[in-house]
Amino acid sequence: MSLPNPEPVQTTPQDSAAQDEAIVPDAEFEAALPKLSDDMNAPLEPMKGFDKPQVTQPATPGAVTSQIESFPPPAAEAPEFARPLTPLAEFKVEPVKIEGVDDEKVATIRYTTVVEGLDAVGLEDRFRDLSALEDGDGKAANATMVSARAREDERLAVRLMQSLGYYDGTAISMIDQNPRNSGNVRATITATPGKLYRLGQVNVVAGPTVPAGLVDRELNLNPGDPIQAERVQGAEANVSLRLPQQGYPFVKLGERDILLDEETQLGDYTLPVELGPRAVFGEIVSQGERPVFDVEHINILRRYKQGAIYDSRQVDDLREALVATSLFSTVAVEPVKTGQPGPDGTEVVNLLVRQNAGRPRTLAGEIGYSTGQGFRAEGSWTHRNFFPHEGALIGSAVLGTQEQGISGTFRRSNAGQRDRTFQMQAGINHSDYAAYESYTGTLAVRWSRDSTPIWQKRWTYFYGAELVGSNEDQYNYNKGARDRGTWLIAALPGFVGYDVSDNLLNPTRGFRLKANVSPETSVRGSIRPYARLMVEGTAYYPVSSSIVIAGRARVGSIPGIARNDLPPSRRYYAGGGGSVRGFGYQELGPRSPDGKPVGGRSLNEFALEARYRFGNFGIVPFVDAGQVYEGLYPTGQNMRFGAGIGGRLYTNFGPLRVDVATPIGRKPGESKIALYISIGQAF
């Protein structure tokens, strides 16, 4: 069935004329167009009146009218669109949580990582430490993520090989299911190191040095050495370190250039070095808004001589000495050119000390507990620069179960000489121990060279004088009862220490030796001179990275006087947290008929610990031994032993110690369990 043909549309001459009249004539259209510039790169000319409505008037009545209207004005922009976008670093997208669905089990595949070729050049362990695949712990959302990690590991393998001098090294990755159709995949990284590149020519572009060849010697890169990144960087760092120690404080290393030859596998190395002037030490110059020391006192702290060849180690030493005073908020020491000629073609260099005062006052406290001694708390207030320079005023107090006291101390550090301390002290004290009760007043003066946690010294010493007045009780064997007596004691104590341990508060290797000598005289009716002597040694040996064996031995003797003529506070005692653990404080040794310790003229003590540390915690099993004797010599007879275990919490200011111990072969009246809490190792 065919569709009927459409009828043709008939037009009249009037309709055709009307359409022709509605068309804009060509001449008028061309005149309305803007003229274009002959320069194709010229900017477009503005279209005037674009936003105005234009209406074409009909040429004749009944003709079609056309109208061009402008766009309506835009609506007001919402204020949210005017706000700045959130920075990408702060932009967070919370994943949609679907109730009842475990996100970790959805769309997760497991994979294994196989590395081939890197073990031959000793890089497999390092590769696995840095690997993106290994960091993923064998889990990924999909195979595409595994592939992306593998491509990242390809680049890692190439970088690692190049760091050892294998610049032709390549790495490819392959992802396959293992086993087939299991859903688990295996990522294989296959590395091909290629040939090792070595140094060809080694060229140092620098001026002459004194001594000659100084830069080459300290660089120590030679033709034939592998081009290893760590070795090259270390050699350059050694130049930057060693030349300032030998007179060149302003040395600067330029950018290295290594030209590789793929045919010979050699690389020509070039390093430009700007030496700067060879220098000698000049003056010290101080600068700061709130200076602490003047130049005269800073000169006491320096160890070098003016006019000596510049050595950066001496500058570091001066900086450390300033820091150790704890009087600065900021302090820096740096060389400054003067332009003044020095001997042998050198230039004089001053040291600029930039200093600003810190807070000079300190409040400190310490608390501890031990069986037999009870609680003991000590607090102090210190103004470290009350009498400039470095003249400290210290007030301290002790409050404990068996001890109470107050004291005042004047201490001047670096007193006229580096590391020398002068100290005067006055104090009163009450002690109530099992062995005796005493009321004591002390005046003391001392010169010393001490170690601190910041500045640990190999050799330490002190010497001084003490004047002590003490009222004490003791057991009077003539009367068969306890009585009180007053003694006036004058002493000249001295000490020498030698320390090669690696840490003051927590040593792990090395040893320490100490010797105390104190000639004294006590006056109670008559003058009785004597001497208190003691030597001590401690040693530390690391058997592994986490276990340290520590040992201590101490021997003391008091010649020149009978035990019963000695003031009880000047006798030797043993037992307690710093002596023989497992026993109460002063619990070891001879006893009076009333069952209290009487002390002795000699003692020996020994201790052995195994310090095991894991992270910031530690466990310390230990065995202690010791005894006190009435006679002059420590015979080693009737030794008593204590054993226990301790815990350690390692902090920035030293380990917190908690020890629990018990005596071996306990006798009636002795402690069953002893507890000790303090800061620092036992020895």
Image (tube, grey):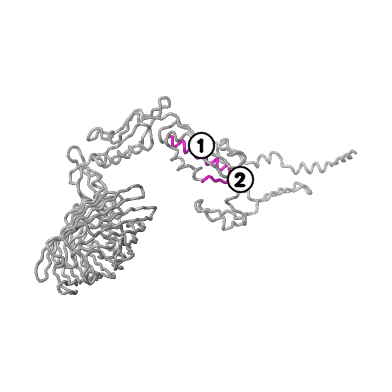
Label 2 amino acid?
A: Met
Provide the secondary structure element on which disc 2 rests.
loop
Within-10-Å neighbours for mark 1: few <14, some 14–19, many 20+: many
Q: Classify residue 624 as left or right of residue 228.
A: left
Which one is in front, 274 or 197?
A: 197
Magenta stretch, residue numbers: 137-161
Q: Is residue 260 left or right of residue 6?
A: left
Q: Inspect this view and state whether residue 462 appears.
A: no
Q: Position of residue 74 (x, y in %)?
A: 62, 54
Instruction: Examine the image and state in which quarter residue 14 appears.
Output: top right
Q: Which mark is residue 47?
A: 2
State the residue position of label 1. 189
Residue 97 is left or right of residue 583, and the answer is right
Residue 526 shown in magenta: no
Quarter in which the C terminus is drawn: bottom left
Residue 318 relative to residue 261: left or right: left
Q: Quadrant of residue 672?
A: bottom left
Residue 143 in magenta stretch: yes
| Residue that lies at the very extreme toward the left in this rendered image | 526
Q: Nearer the viewer, mark 2 or mark 1?
A: 1
Residue 578 pos. (x, y %): 27, 60
Which of the 4 quarters of the picture holds residue 617? bottom left
Residue 682: give x, y in percent of width and height: 29, 58
- Label 1: element kind: strand
Q: Position of residue 648 (x, y in %)?
A: 35, 57
Q: Quadrant of the N terminus?
A: top right
User: What residue lies at 49% left-to-right and 45% top-to-bottom?
Assistant: 135
